[in-house]
Amino acid sequence: MKQSSSVHFDYIIAGAGCAGLSMALRMLNEPQLAQKKIAIIDASKKNENDRTWCFWESGQSFFENIVYHRWSKLVFHTPEKSIPLSISPYQYKMIRGLDFYQHAQTQIQQNHNQIHWIKEKVEAIGNLPNGRAFALANGIEYTADYVFNSIWFEQDRQQFNLGSSFKLLQHFKGWVIETDQPTFNLEEACFMDFRVDQELGTTFVYVLPVSTTRALVEYTYFNEKLLSPEAYDGQLKQYLKVFWHLEQYQIIETEFGIIPMTNHSFKRDEGGVINIGTAGGWTKPSSGFTFQFIQKNTATLVAALVAGKKPVVQKNWFQKRFSWYDATLLHVLHHQLMEGKTIFYHLFSKLAAHKVLQFLDDETNLLDEIQILNAVPTRIFLPAAFQELLPNFLKRQR
C-alpha cells in the first residue's frame, strides 16, 4: 500500500492486543463486512508468549481451536480450609498469548486484501471536522468511519488518576515452570490459593498445570502499589518451596501484568472513536477478568456495524446493577473492611462454584444475587452497597 499524508479505511483498530485482534477477527468472520477495508495499527511484532488468558465457559469458544488446556475441576485454598470446586457446566480454559497472536496473524494474512497491519506506533487519535475519525502514526493521518481504540494515552492515565474513587491495581507475575519429576495434577487447577501472606492486601496464587511436570504459577496482588521485580520472584520461589516442596525447576517463560480495579467512568466513545478493551472499561472491576467481556462486547459492536448502527456497548439501568456490585466490593477492599481472602471464602464455601462464576460474568438473576449477598456478612456489605447505590446508578458511562 502506497502511503501518503492521509489514507482512508472503513475501520481502524488502534492497538493489536486481545481486544483489537478479537475485533478484527470478528469483523473477518462477518460476511456482510467482507467489502470493508480495515487497518490495524500497532508497532509490536506480537511474536512472544507475553501473557495468558483464562476464562470459564459452558460451550464452545470463538477461539476454541487455540484453547491450550482446560480443566473441569478447580480448588480454592485458605489457611483454614481447602475447597474443591466442581464448576459444571463450565470448563476453565487457557489461551496462551502467542497462540492467540499467531492465530490472528494467520487469519489476517489470509485476508490481506481486506485488512492491513500497519506496524507503527499510534501517536494520537481523534475526530476530524468532516465527521471522520483518525489515527496518527509516523506522521501519517489514517482516517476511518470508526477508530476502535484500545490504547491508554497519557491524558487518559491523568484522568484516571484524578477521577477515580477506587484505584486498586491487580498486578501479577507468573512463571511457567518445568520439573524433573511428575508434580502436578493435570485434571485440577488451583483457582486461588490464599495461604500466602496478606500483609500487602488481597494476595493469592493460582497454579494451572498443563502437564504433570509443567504449570503456570502466578502470584497476584490487589493493592495500589507495585513491587520490585525481585520481590515478585522471591514470593514465587517461597511459594513453590513451602507449598509444593520445589526448589529445583526450570523457568520456561515469564509474564507480568497490571490490571486496573476501579469504579472509574471510562470514556466509551467520542464521535467516531470507540474505546475497547481496558480503555473502554471492559475489565471486570472486582476481579480483573477481561477475556470473556472482550468477546461479548466485540460481538455486540460487530452486530451493530452489520445493522448499520453506531457500534457502542450500552447498559440500561438494570444492567448497571453489576457495576454497583463491583463498586461495593471495591469499597470494602479499599476501606479494608474485610480481607479479600475472607470474602472469597464466604462465597465459595456457601455457594455452588458455578453460581459464583456466573455472577463474576454478570450473568446471574436477582434471586441468585440475593443469595450471593446473603453469603457475605451483611453488616459489612449492606452499608457499603447503600453508599455506592446512587453514584453508580446516576453515573453515566461517558
Image: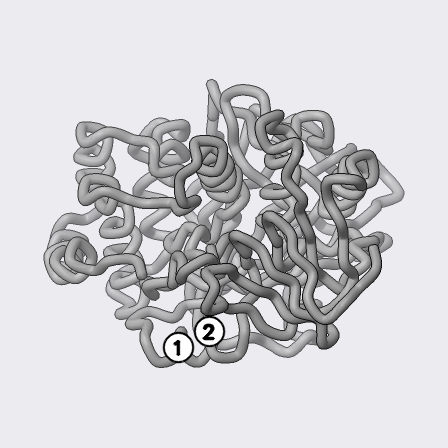
Question: Badge 2 is on which residue?
Answer: 156
Instruction: Report the quarter where the N terminus lies.
Output: bottom right
- Residue type indicated by callout 1: Gln
17 above or below 238? above
In the rendering, which numbered label is found on residue 31? none
Q: Is mark 2 on a helix, strand or loop?
A: helix
- At which x and y percent is residue 369? 22, 35
Residue at image location 38% in from the left, 40% down from the top = 360
- At which x and y percent is residue 130? 47, 64
Q: Inspect this view and state whether residue 347 appears.
A: yes
- At which x and y percent is residue 213? 81, 38
Instruction: Report the quarter where the C terminus lies.
Output: bottom left
Say how many tags the image has. 2
- At which x and y percent is residue 305? 48, 38
Question: Badge 1 is on which residue?
Answer: 159
Q: Is mark 1 on a helix, strand or loop?
A: helix
Residue at image location 67% in from the left, 54% down from the top = 16
Camera-nearest residue between 374 and 138: 138
- Residue type indicated by callout 2: Asp
Q: How far apart are marks 2 and 1 (CA)?
A: 5 Å
Residue at image location 54% in from the left, 58% down from the top = 149
Camera-nearest residue between 321 and 279: 279
Camera-nearest residue between 259 and 121: 121
Within 10 Å of the Cα at label 2, are there few (<14), some (14-19), or many (20+) other Cα atoms?
A: some
